[in-house]
Image: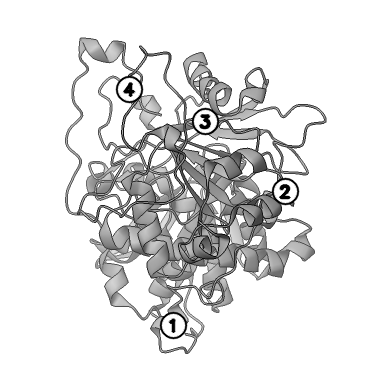
C-alpha cells in the first residue's frame, strides 16, 4: 500500500509516524478539520450563540474533587456567589481525584450506543478545555496540567472496542491513525509488540496531573472570589421539600439557595436511602515504577500513553518524575496455548476489518482504562473496605506482582525497576454505567453530580461547565439530560463467596 492510499484509509504513513514519534510522542499531532470545532459544544447546540448566565443567588458545592471544583469555578465565572465545601480539602489522599495523574482520551468503544458516543465527544471537548485552562492559568500559577502524549491502543487482533472507536472517530472526523506494529517497534523499541497486529493511535490524547489539577482549579476558584470551607457536610434543615442549610462537623452552619453534591464515592454514604443500592465503590490500584537513571525513553514526551487489554499507563512526567505509571496487571503463568490460525497475531496487519455493529459493546467486563465494570459487591469484602473514610489503601504484593508481570512482558527493560510509589482510590460505579446529574427527588434545590464510573476525572472541565449550566438553568439541550438521570434499577445483591473464590484473583 502506498503512503497516499494509506492516508486515505486513515492509516498514518510509516515514515510520517516514525518521524513524528522520533521528535517526541507529546508533539504528535495529525491535524483534522474536527480539531478546530469540537462536537458537543453548547454554543453549537444553541445555534452558535454563547449562553451567558446572569448573577445568581448563593450556591454551596459539596465536594472539592475535580467535578466539584470545576462546577464551583464555572458557577463563579457566571456570577454566582459560591462556597466550596470538602471534608478533607482539594486533592486529599482519600479522594478519587487525589492520584498523581489521570489519562484523557476519547476511546469509548467499550460503552454502549449513544452513551459511548457522547462520552467520546465530551472527552474530545475536555481535551480542548484542559488546554484552555492551562492557557488561562498556567502562566500565573507557574504550572502545566495537561500533557499531550498521544495514546496507543494495542491488541493481538482487532476487537470491537477498537473497531467501535474507529467507527465513531470516522463519523465525527476525529484524528486517529491505524499504525503498523513494525512502526511502533521502530519508534518505541522499549515496547514489546511481537504478538500485536492491531494498533490504533489517538494523537490528541494525553495525561493530566490529577492531584495538582484538583488543587489548582480550587485555587483559581478562590482567585475569582469563591470561598473554600473544610468540613464534613450533613443536611440539617429541610423545609417544604427544600434544603435550607447544612451543618459542618466544625460546628458551622451554611445556608444557600441551591446545593450541589459532587461527593464521588461518598454518594451512597451521604444519601444511603437513594444510592446505597445504585452505586458500588471498588478500589483501583496503581503502581509507579522508577525510571532508570539517565534513560529518558520512559519519560514524557518520549513515549505515548498505552492501552493493552485490562492495562493502561503512561510515561513519567517531568519535572517531578513520580514514575512510570501502570494501572492493571497480568495473571500468573498459564499452560501454553495453541497458536491461533487465520488472521493471527503474527500477521502484523495494519488494516482494520469492518466493525461489528451489534448492540452489545465489546469488552463489557473491563473498560478501556482497565477498571473492572462488574457492579457486584464482594460478599467477603469487610464494610470498612467499602467506606472511603475507613478503607486501607495499601497495595499488597499480589497486586504489585501482577503489574510487574505486565511490565516484564511489555516493557522488559523495566522488569527489575523499583516501585517508586503506589496509589489506591475508590471510584463509584452506577447501576446504569452512566454519569448522574439530576435533582434530588425529595429536595428540589439539591443537585446530585456524581457517578464517574472510573472515567469521570478526564471530563472535569466539561462536566463542571455542564453542571453549572444545569444549576443556572442555561443549558440548552434537554435530550442530553435524560441520560444523566438517577438510575431506576439497583445492583443485584452481592453473591456469597464460594470455595473457588479463595483462589480466584480479585478484580482490580
Label 3 or label 2, whichever lies nearer to me, is 3
User: What residue occupies the far right of the structure in this picture?
Assistant: 294
Helix, strand or loop under label 3: loop
Of mark 2 and mark 4, the one earlier in the sequence is 2
Residue annotated with mark 1: 44
Residue 363 versus residue 3: which sits nearer the camera?
A: 3
Task: Give me the residue at 66% from left, 17% from top.
Answer: 416
Task: Give me the residue at 20% from left, 53% from top.
Answer: 358
Mark 2 to mark 1 CA distance (whole Å): 37 Å
Mark 3 to mark 2 CA distance (whole Å): 20 Å
Residue annotated with mark 2: 22
Location of the C terminus by quadrant is: top left
Q: Mark 4: few, some, or many residues within 10 Å (few <14, many ≥20)?
A: few
Of mark 1 and mark 3, the one earlier in the sequence is 1
Mark 3 to mark 4 CA distance (whole Å): 39 Å
Label 1 or label 3, whichever lies nearer to me, is 3
Protein image colouring: one colour
Q: Residue 423, can we see it?
A: yes
Residue 285 versus residue 408: which sits nearer the camera?
A: 408
Decide if residue 24 is on the left or right side of residue 371. right
Residue annotated with mark 3: 194
User: Is disc 2 in contact with disc 1, using a CB cutoff of under 8 Å?
Assistant: no
Amino acid at each position: 500500500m502506498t503512503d497516499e492510499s494509506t492516508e486515505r484509509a486513515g492509516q498514518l504513513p510509516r515514515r510520517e509516524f516514525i518521524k513524528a514519534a522520533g521528535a517526541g510522542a507529546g508533539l504528535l499531532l495529525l491535524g483534522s478539520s474536527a480539531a478546530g470545532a469540537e462536537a458537543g459544544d453548547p454554543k453549537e447546540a444553541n445555534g452558535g450563540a454563547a449562553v451567558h448566565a446572569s448573577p445568581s443567588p448563593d450556591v454551596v458545592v459539596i465536594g472539592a474533587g475535580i467535578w466539584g471544583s470545576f462546577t464551583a469555578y464555572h458557577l463563579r465565572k457566571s456570577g454566582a456567589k459560591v462556597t466550596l465545601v470538602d471534608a478533607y480539602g482539594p486533592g486529599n489522599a482519600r479522594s478519587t481525584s487525589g492520584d498523581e495523574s489521570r489519562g484523557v482520551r476519547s476511546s469509548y468503544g467499550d460503552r454502549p450506543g449513544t452513551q459511548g458516543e457522547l462520552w467520546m465527544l465530551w472527552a474530545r471537548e475536555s481535551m480542548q478545555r484542559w488546554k484552555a485552562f492551562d492557557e488561562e492559568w498556567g502562566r500565573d500559577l507557574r504550572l502545566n496540567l495537561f500533557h499531550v502524549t498521544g495514546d496507543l491502543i494495542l491488541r493481538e487482533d482487532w476487537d470491537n472496542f477498537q473497531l467501535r472507536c474507529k467507527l465513531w472517530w470516522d463519523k465525527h472526523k476525529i484524528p486517529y491513525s491505524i499504525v503498523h506494529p513494525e512502526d511502533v517497534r521502530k519508534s518505541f523499541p522499549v515496547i514489546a509488540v511481537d504478538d500485536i497486529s492491531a494498533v490504533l493511535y489517538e494523537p490528541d490524547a494525553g495525561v493530566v496531573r490529577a492531584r495538582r489539577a484538583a488543587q489548582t482549579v480550587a485555587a483559581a476558584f478562590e482567585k475569582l472570589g469563591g470561598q473554600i470551607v473544610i468540613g464534613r457536610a450533613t443536611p440539617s434543615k429541610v423545609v417544604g421539600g427544600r434544603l435550607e442549610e447544612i451543618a459542618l462537623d466544625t460546628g458551622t452552619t451554611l445556608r444557600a439557595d441551591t446545593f450541589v453534591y459532587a461527593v464521588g464515592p461518598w454518594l451512597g454514604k451521604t444519601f444511603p436511602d437513594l444510592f446505597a443500592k445504585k452505586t458500588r465503590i471498588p478500589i483501583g490500584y496503581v503502581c509507579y515504577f522508577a525510571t532508570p537513571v539517565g534513560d529518558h525513553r520512559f519519560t514524557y514526551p518520549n513515549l505515548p500513553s498505552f492501552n493493552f487489554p485490562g492495562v493502561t499507563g503512561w510515561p513519567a512526567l517531568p519535572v517531578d518524575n513520580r514514575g512510570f505509571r501502570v494501572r492493571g496487571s497480568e495473571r500468573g503463568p498459564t499452560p501454553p496455548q495453541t497458536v491461533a490460525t487465520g488472521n493471527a497475531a503474527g500477521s502484523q496487519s495494519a488494516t482494520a476489518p469492518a466493525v461489528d455493529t451489534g448492540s452489545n459493546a465489546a469488552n463489557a467486563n473491563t473498560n478501556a482504562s482497565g477498571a473492572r465494570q462488574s457492579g457486584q459487591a464482594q460478599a467477603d469484602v469487610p464494610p470498612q473496605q467499602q467506606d472511603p473514610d475507613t478503607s486501607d489503601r495499601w497495595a499488597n504484593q499480589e497486586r504489585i506482582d501482577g503489574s510487574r508481570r505486565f511490565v516484564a512482558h511489555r516493557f522488559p527493560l523495566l522488569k527489575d525497576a523499583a516501585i517508586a510509589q503506589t496509589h489506591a482510590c475508590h471510584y463509584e460505579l452506577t447501576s446504569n454505567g452512566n454519569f448522574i446529574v439530576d435533582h434530588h427527588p425529595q429536595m428540589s434545590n439539591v443537585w446530585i453530580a456524581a457517578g464517574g464510573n472510573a472515567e469521570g476525572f478526564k471530563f472535569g472541565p466539561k462536566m463542571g461547565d455542564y453542571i453549572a449550566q444545569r444549576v443556572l438553568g442555561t443549558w440548552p439541550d434537554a435530550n442530553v439530560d435524560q441520560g444523566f438521570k438517577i438510575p431506576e434499577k439497583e445492583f443485584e445483591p452481592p453473591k456469597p463467596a464460594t470455595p473457588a473464590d479463595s483462589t480466584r484473583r480479585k478484580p482490580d
